[in-house]
Image: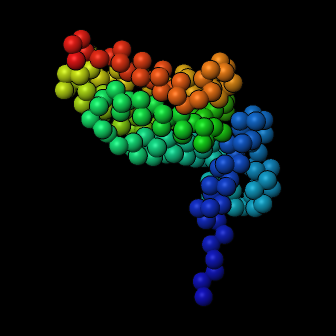
Amino acid sequence: MPRPRTHDEALRLRLLDRAGELLSTEGAKALGLRRLAADAGTSTTAVYSLFGGKTELVNALYVEGFRRLGARLRAVERTGDVVADLVRLGLAYRASALASRNLYPVMFTRAVPGFEPNEAAARLARSTVDPLLETVRDGVDRGVLADVPPGVIAASCWAFAHGLVSLELDGNLPPEFGTAGMYERALRANASGWLRAGA
């Protein structure tokens, strides 16, 4: 009978989640492999076996964050109403941030000094917003959205949603934004601002 794998996907995800917690609550100095292993109830050998070292661990955190975000965005079904679809993508962005808030520092800030994602990780991160870009491109092609480069509109929508989410994660939004309804109104107002005149 084969021996059960002890360094499996469940352990990898548990280590990543705990590493994200340490990073977001205590900073990069707390992200020691020995402490991480102890907190996750495993050995440093397991951490090295799964990730290789601290740099690879941080890269895995970065990849996991964008993998989860990408899965949420790709799950948003298009309705044919471009503004509604942009709002739904913005809400999915927020849902991903709230579900994986401990991964956002490594994804979008310099939480780990000197960290640079490897090329494969950077490529994955860039592709994460493809559903947004495709939705915008479709809206421009159909004459619904303004006749400007789709990347401009997509970047604007991303920046708007990301700004709101970042303010929420940092506790800097006014209490009135405590419901998804206000997010939806704000996202709709931003998306509607990109409608082509007369559309």
Q: Which residue is found at the position 29% from the left and 17% from the top?
A: 195
Would residue 168 appear left or right of 199 to someone viewing this image? right
From this viewpoint, is residue 59 visible?
no
Viewer-proximal residue among 148 and 55: 148
Query: Which quadrant: the N terminus?
Result: bottom right
Decide if residue 58 is on the left or right side of residue 190.
Answer: right
Going 32% across and 39% down the picture, which residue do you hit?
78
Task: Confirm whether residue 47 shows in the render.
Answer: yes
**Residue drawn at 71 percent across, 38 percent down:** 23
Give percent across and percent down for residue 197. 24, 11
Locate residue 108, reporting x and y percent.
57, 29
Q: Nearer the viewer, residue 175 or 32?
A: 175
Q: Is residue 147 above or below residue 53?
A: above
Q: Position of residue 64 (x, y in %)?
A: 55, 46
Which residue is farthest top?
Answer: 197
Does residue 122 appear to the left or right of 28 in the view shown?
Answer: left
Quadrant (top left, top right, bottom left, bottom right) of the C terminus: top left
Quarter occupied by residue 40: bottom right
